[in-house]
Image (cartoon, rainbow, N blue to C red):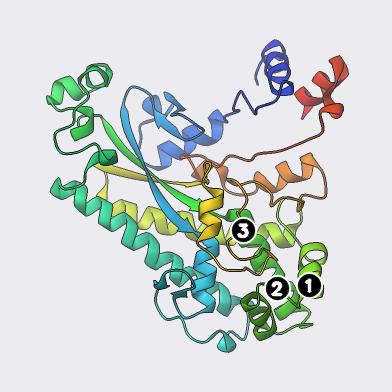
Amino acid sequence: SSPRPLLERVAESLKAGGGFPFLDNDDAIVAGYVQAGIPVEDAREYANSNCWETLIAGRSDQELVRGINWLLLLELALNRGVSAMYGKMGPDTGESARFDTFGDLMRAWEVQLDALLQAGIDYIGQEIEQGTLEHSGHGAFHYNPLLSALMRDCIEKERDVLKGGARYAIWTVMAEAFGNAVDAMAALKTLVYDERTVSLDEVQRAMAANWEGHERLRQTILNRVPRYANDDDDADEIGRHMLRAFVDRTRAYAHRWAPRTIFVPSVGTFSWYQSIGYEVAASPDGRRAREAVTSNMSPVNGADRSGLPAAIRSAVKMYGNELPGGAPVDLRASKSAFRGQAGTDRLVAL
């Protein structure tokens, strides 16, 4: 465990606000990189890349695979593969009226997930194999000689870091809108399939109206159904199921392009939660059309009603040691809870 003086310094820094320093979990991240095929001696050299995403320091190049928007996948599942913003995007998984069980709905979501993951990973993997993918949009004639000189294997290979010279090329496959999607699925399971107090058609009509005229149903969803980040086994099991599908399918398609390109799963949004939400119409978690989604693997604003320990307990159920790319949980608390030495002790304990 970390020494007490270090934890106190970290706590004092966090109390100043801003969310820094970022707290990483060696046990989870190292194990995740080993599962992805990185030797343990290199996996132990991981570090924050910039914001919260990780890379193998001095040994890897890194990019992101954006766009695995879980709420958008649910929209596609409910609308035969059609997005309100983009039109036809995914396979036709049938009329939602034929989803007789919650399992039927979840399978439709998984089909949409599978299609989007395969398309994204295979496109990048093939472009890298063919040498036609431009790194970060830098251009065909862009090089980084200083960074290459400091990166393992670039000199031995006589290749620039932007041209495949690093020991590992890591692409982080990022799941977006995690908390919203879990809450949306929990709402549908509870109200439509378990209690049967409302039909799926009624929920879809309310979403089509952007919840106008359906505020009572929206408030029921916001306040009476299980939600992620409350240590609620019903909601958390839905999150585990969805994340298990995401991790397993990412690995399956990543295997085709290893070891030259390594795709690792993660959950995150960076600062793009507004643009991610802008892609999606109203959703079954009570969110209005084009509203921002929650950040990273964090609770939806206002949904974490059971305190910080409960939010943490929900998060640690989510296969963290299989998400080496990162799965940050942003937590907020009143400053008054951490004032003085007693507050520092309380934050260290947390």
Contact check, label 2 and label 1, Cβ < 8 Å: yes
| Residue type at tag 1 | Glu
| Residue type at tag 2 | Trp
Label 2 belongs to which residue?
Answer: 211
Mark 3 vs mark 1, CA separation in Å: 16 Å
Look at the picture and state if 79 lies above or below 17.
Answer: below
Look at the image and tell me in which quarter the C terminus lies. top right
Label 1 belongs to which residue?
Answer: 215
Mark 2 vs mark 1, CA separation in Å: 6 Å
Label 3 belongs to which residue?
Answer: 291
Which circle's residue, 3 or 1, is located before the other in the chain? Answer: 1
Locate residue 166 relative to residue 37 in the image: left or right. left
Secondary element type, mark 2: loop
Residue drawn 75% across and 83% down? 198
Crowding near pointer 2: few (<14 within 10 Å), some, many (20+)? Answer: many
Look at the picture and state if 257 lies above or below 79.
Answer: above
Crowding near pointer 3: few (<14 within 10 Å), some, many (20+)? Answer: some
- Residue 19 location (% of width, % of height): 65, 29
Residue 160, quarter of the rendered image? top left
